[in-house]
Amino acid sequence: MRIHHLDCGTMCPLAGRLMGGGGGLLDRGLMVCHCLLIETARDGLVLVDTGYGTLDCAAPRRLGRGFVAVSGPRLDPAQTAHAQVRALGHDPADVRHVVVTHLDLDHAGGLPDFPGATVHLHRRELDAARARATMAERRRYLPHQFAQHARWNPVSEAGDTWLGLPAVQRLAGLDADVALIPLHGHTRGHSGVVVRAGRGWLLHAGDAYFHHHELVEPRSAPPGVRLFQAAMQMDGAARHASQDALRRLHREHPEVEIVSAHDPAELARVRHRVATRAAA
Ligand SMILES: [Zn+2]
């Protein structure tokens, strides 16, 4: 399997310094929407998370004016997964599977660009996005991004484990080594996605954490990142338990590379490693 690391939605949030960037308090920060495009032998292309899509770029207002003002998404059509799949020489129709960590607006925006793909996700997440039961969930889940999608594969844990964590190891119709790891808290059904990568594993942890310093002890994160995560969480106890599980994994399993969705330093790190390996 070949794995591409894409940024499907650069964001320049307010108060960049508080979010971990340099510069002054009023300078904007930098966040990415780290997505994976996996070329498999038998299952076509698999996309992990989708960032923003062509609909979002065409009509940014649908994301919500407040969100656009605070997060500063670039919304460049060339950054959509759809455009990047093309730029890599593939037909977007060959994206047969999409696995999403959750359905927040900065992760589900690309779904309308892949109408034929089966979307795999935790059942709790699909239920939460459809119900939009709270004010916060009405802001974060945008029906125009996902309500029209026809092919869903909502999954739940059934006793499988992966390195000691509950896991859903068989995603229907997908033979490749891709599994869903429940990492709830940020949203009700938020999950990580594990992909076999050579002799080890790659774990895309979505928004279970936001800054690479959160994976090591003593953990730390820029104050704005901590505030943002607390403000966005649907279940604080579950979110902390998810981060504890990731720290244990990071400590005990060096064969697992963990990345989150929005940390630009992690994206730069994996791209550098992929490039140096290709050159060797
Ligand atoms: Zn996010």
Image (tube, rainbow, N blue to C red):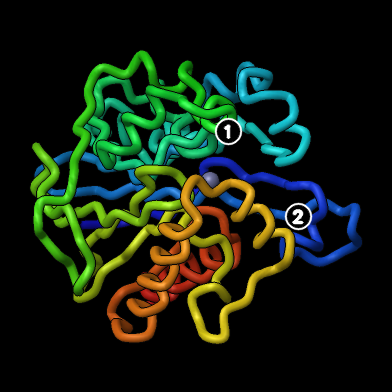
Q: CA distance from mark 2 to mark 1?
A: 23 Å
Instruction: From the top left corner, tell me how far across and down residue 178 is, in percent.
Output: 20, 53
Name the residue rendered at 29%, 54% in the picture.
Answer: 182
Label 2 CB less than 8 angstroms from ligand 1:
no
User: Where residue 235 is drawn, which disc sits there?
Assistant: none
Q: Amino acid at mark 1?
A: Ala
Instruction: From the top left corner, tell me how far across and down residue 138 is, in percent.
Output: 54, 25
Instruction: From the top left corner, tell me how far across and down residue 64 is, in percent.
Output: 67, 24
Measured along the vertical axis of the image, is residue 61 above or below residue 7?
A: above
Count neighbours of disc 1 (C-alpha within 10 A) and say few if under 14, some if 14 to 19, many if 20 or more.
Answer: few
Instruction: From the top left corner, tell me how far across and down residue 51 is, in percent.
Output: 49, 38
Name the residue rendered at 13%, 54% in the picture.
Answer: 169
Name the residue rendered at 10%, 60% in the picture.
Answer: 160
Q: Nearer the viewer, residue 238 or 243?
A: 238
Assign the N terminus to one quadrant of the image. Answer: bottom left
Disc 2 secondary structure class: loop
Q: In this image, 110 relative to 15: left or right?
A: left
Count neighbours of disc 2 (C-alpha within 10 A) and say few if under 14, some if 14 to 19, many if 20 or more.
Answer: many
User: Where residue 29 is drawn, which disc sits there?
Assistant: 2
Q: Nearer the viewer, residue 42 or 230?
A: 230
Q: In this image, 4 relative to 53: left or right?
A: left
Q: In this image, 27 relative to 32: left or right?
A: right
- Which is in the foreground here, disc 2 or disc 1? 1
Determine which residue is flagged by label 1: 136
Disc 1 secondary structure class: helix
Assign the C terminus to one quadrant of the image. Answer: bottom left
Q: Nearer the viewer, residue 40 or 201?
A: 201
Which numbered disc, 2 or 1, marks the residue that appears first in the sequence? Answer: 2
